């Protein structure tokens, strides 16, 4: 629409102002894959512990038992939003947009991606699903069992992890504590001793501020300045923390508004993936009256290629 003057300024008549946060850093940084079944599987392996390896000259060689690979898996989850727009609403002049359906689909897409970010980083366990219960994926919090640091005491907390084709939801500790640099150092050491080299720390906004203000190892401010190719390219601002084992790139500390504030996630994105059984799509539903109906959906899961590559700080204070 044509612009008009207001106190010496120009404003656009047809505009809708929405400041709801939409950045989804885990979803943006995680590689995208292809799932071919509702239960998505992969394989993991590990080397035996280093030992003294010396043998007698001319001695016979005897084969030792080899450990079989482990085959974990995760359930795909359907995320959906349904939009219905009446014929009248679509026909009349609408201040702020030309098509109500197009506007609502755009809005729903952002909402579903926020829901997906919460599911990917969260503490839900797997649910196989039935005719009355929706299948759910296990979030990253639920997978991590090798590298866990407690902000206070363990206090009844458990993380069963993957077992017998399922992942159980963890139990939070009863005690909480403030995020400190010492906690992060302990977690980085644990990951390094397990063979991992994670380089991104995801924190809720409260604890992201604590890290920026209180960590002596913060080296510089990092910001994604590459040309924006769409929402997936936006990482946002992060401080770079340099540890003994983080390499030249350091650990980027990134705020994630849709993860749980009480948990910090240290992630190596080479060892996670988001496989889609069905990518984001819109489908027109049958017309049953004077309205148009469509749904927007995606079906996907989280593949934690090796949970020992990552770590978590549990029981952080949330305010």
Image (tube, grey):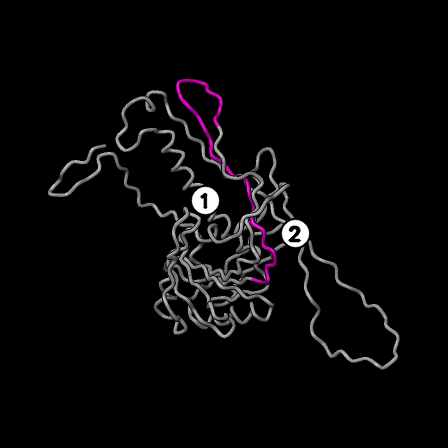
Tell me the tag on residue 165.
none
Point 46% across, 49% down: residue: 118
In x, y percent, where is residue 233?
43, 51
Q: Quadrant of the N terminus?
A: top left
The residues tagged by marks 1 and 2 sit, at their Cα atoms, a distance apart of 25 Å
In x, y percent, where is residue 249?
46, 67
Find out whether the residues at labels 1 and 2 contact each other: C-beta distance under 8 Å: no
10 up-or-down from 311: above or below: above
Point 48% across, 32% down: residue: 282
The residue labelled by disc 1 is 115
Point 59% across, 64% down: residue: 146
User: Mark 1, mark 2: which one is toward the viewer?
Assistant: 2
299 up-or-down from 307: above or below: above
Q: Please, what secondary structure does the residue beneath circle 1 have?
A: helix
Which residues are drawn in magenta? 284-309
In x, y percent, where is residue 183?
47, 70
Q: Quadrant of residue 276?
A: top right
Say whether residue 13 is left or right of residue 274: left
Sort mark 1 into few (<14), some (14-19) or many (20+) by Cα contacts within 10 Å.
some
Q: Quadrant of the C terminus?
A: bottom left
Tell me the tag on residue 42.
2
Looking at the image, which residue sits at the far front? 227
Q: Is residue 295 magenta?
A: yes
Say whether residue 129 is left or right of residue 96: right
């Amino acid at each position: 629409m044509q612009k008009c003057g207001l106190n010496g300024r120009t404003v656009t008549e047809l505009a809708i102002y929405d400041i709801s946060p939409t950045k989804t850093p885990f979803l943006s940084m995680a590689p995208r894959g292809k799932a071919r079944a509702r239960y998505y599987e992969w394989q993991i392996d590990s080397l035996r512990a280093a030992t003294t390896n010396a043998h007698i000259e001319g001695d016979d060689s005897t084969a030792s038992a080899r450990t079989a690979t482990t085959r974990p898996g995760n359930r795909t989850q359907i995320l959906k939003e349904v939009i219905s727009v009446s014929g009248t609403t679509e026909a009349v002049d609408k201040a702020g947009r030309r098509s109500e359906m197009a506007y609502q689909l755009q809005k729903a897409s952002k909402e579903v991606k926020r829901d997906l970010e919460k599911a990917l980083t969260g503490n839900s366990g797997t649910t196989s699903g039935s005719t009355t219960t929706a299948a759910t994926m296990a979030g990253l919090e639920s997978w991590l069992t090798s590298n866990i640091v407690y902000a206070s005491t363990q206090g009844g907390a458990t993380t069963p992890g993957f077992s017998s084709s399922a992942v159980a939801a963890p139990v939070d500790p009863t005690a909480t504590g403030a995020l400190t640099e010492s906690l992060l150092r302990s977690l980085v050491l644990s990951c390094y001793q397990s063979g991992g080299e994670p380089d991104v720390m995801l924190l809720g906004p409260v604890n992201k501020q604590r890290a920026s203000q209180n960590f002596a190892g913060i080296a510089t401010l990092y910001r994604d300045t590459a040309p924006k190719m769409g929402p997936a390219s936006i990482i946002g601002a992060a401080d770079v923390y340099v540890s003994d084992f983080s390499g030249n790139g350091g650990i980027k500390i990134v705020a994630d508004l849709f993860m749980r504030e009480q948990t910090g996630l240290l992630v190596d994105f080479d060892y996670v993936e988001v496989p889609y059984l069905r990518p984001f799509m819109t489908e027109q539903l049958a017309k049953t009256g004077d309205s148009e109906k469509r749904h927007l959906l995606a079906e996907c899961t989280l593949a934690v290629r090796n949970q020992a590559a990552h770590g978590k700080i549990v029981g952080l204070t949330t305010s």
